[in-house]
Amino acid sequence: MDVLLLLVLLAWAWRSPSLAAPFTYQLARLSSQRSSCKPIPSSMTLCHGVGYNEMRLPNLLGHESMKEALQQAASWVPLLTKQCHGDTKKFLCSLFAPVCISDLEDPVYPCRSLCEAVRDGCTPVMAAFGFPWPEMFNCSRFPRGNELCVPLAGPDDRLQLAKEDAVCAACTSRGHSEKEFLENFCRQDFALKMSIKALSSADGDLKVTPELKSRTLYKQGGWSEEELKKPVLWLTHGETCACEELRGQGTVVLAMGHKAAGRLVISWVRRWQRGERELKKFTRAVRKIQC
C-alpha cells in the first residue's frame, strides 16, 4: 500500500472520537512558528522516493527552515548506502521530512516499533565507524502504535519503495562534485580517482573493478596488500538502482567510501568531466587536506 494512502487512512481512523488519544510524544520543543506543508525539495537526497511529496515544517527535530533541514538531512545519506535496514529511509524521513496531511493538525511520528527495528539493524554498522545511536532518535519517545504513527513497512511496501528509489544514493548529485569530495574526504576510509576496467553484478550488488594504471589513491585507510594490488569496489544493491556515474568501461570517476564487512563499499561516486590539467590541480588540493 502506498505510504501516503496508508497514513491518510490512519489519520481518518484516529480522528474518530472512539480511537482518539492525547499525543504526548515530543522530540523537540515545537516552534511557535505555525507549521505548514512544503514540497519536499529535489535537493533533499535522503528522502527521494519516500512515498509522499509534502513535508511538515518545522520538522520533528526542530528545524525551522528548509535550509537547516536540508543541511542536517544530508549527513544521514551515507547510512542509506549501508543497507542496514529496509526502513532506514522511512524512519529518518519521518523525522527530517515528516509527512504533512492538511486535515491533520498534529504531527505524525514514527512508531516505536519502526524506530527499534531500524536502530537494531543500523547500530552495529554505525558503531563500526565510531558513531553511537543518537539520543534524538531515542525510541522510547515514540508512540507504541495505539496512536497514529508511521509503521514498519510490509514486504509489498518495501518492494514499491525500492522501485521508486531509482537512483543509487551514492550516485545522487547534491551540488558541486569537487566541493563535495573535499568536504567529505576526511569522513571516508578511502578516496581515489580511477578509470573503470569492468563492471559486473553479484547477489544484487554492483562490482566495480578499477584500471590499475589510471588509478590515483588519495586515501586508503584499511586496505590490505591484496586490495592495493587487485582492488575491487562495491556499490551495495547496485543492481536495483540506477547510477549514471558508472557508465561502463573506461569511465573516469572520483570515488569515496568505507570498508564494511570485508568489502570496499562506495558511498559517493561522480564522473570526472574536466581535463587532465584540472585533474592535476584538483589532486594537489586533495593532497593538502589534513584530517
Image (spheres, helix red, strand yellow):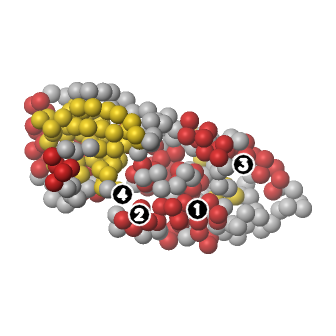
Of the numbered discs in the image, which one, if any, rests on residue 117? 1
Residue drawn at point x = 33 percent, y = 49 percent? 265
Q: CA distance from mark 4 to mark 3?
A: 36 Å
Q: CA distance from mark 1 to mark 4?
A: 20 Å
Numbered disc 3: secondary structure: helix
Nearer the observer: mark 1 or 4; the answer is: 4
Check disc 2 and report the residue beneath it: 126
Nearer the observer: mark 3 or 1; the answer is: 1
Residue drawn at point x = 27 percent, y = 31 percent? 198
First in sequence: mark 4 vs mark 3? 3
Numbered disc 1: secondary structure: helix
Q: Where residue 116 appears, x then y in whole percent? A: 59, 65
Residue type, mark 3 in image: Leu
Position of residue 125 in the picture relative to residue 268 (left or right): right
Residue drawn at point x = 27 percent, y = 47 percent? 256
Q: CA distance from mark 1 to mark 2?
A: 14 Å
Q: Number of numbered discs present?
A: 4
Q: Where residue 101 appears, x then y in whole percent? A: 70, 47
Check disc 3 and report the residue beneath it: 7
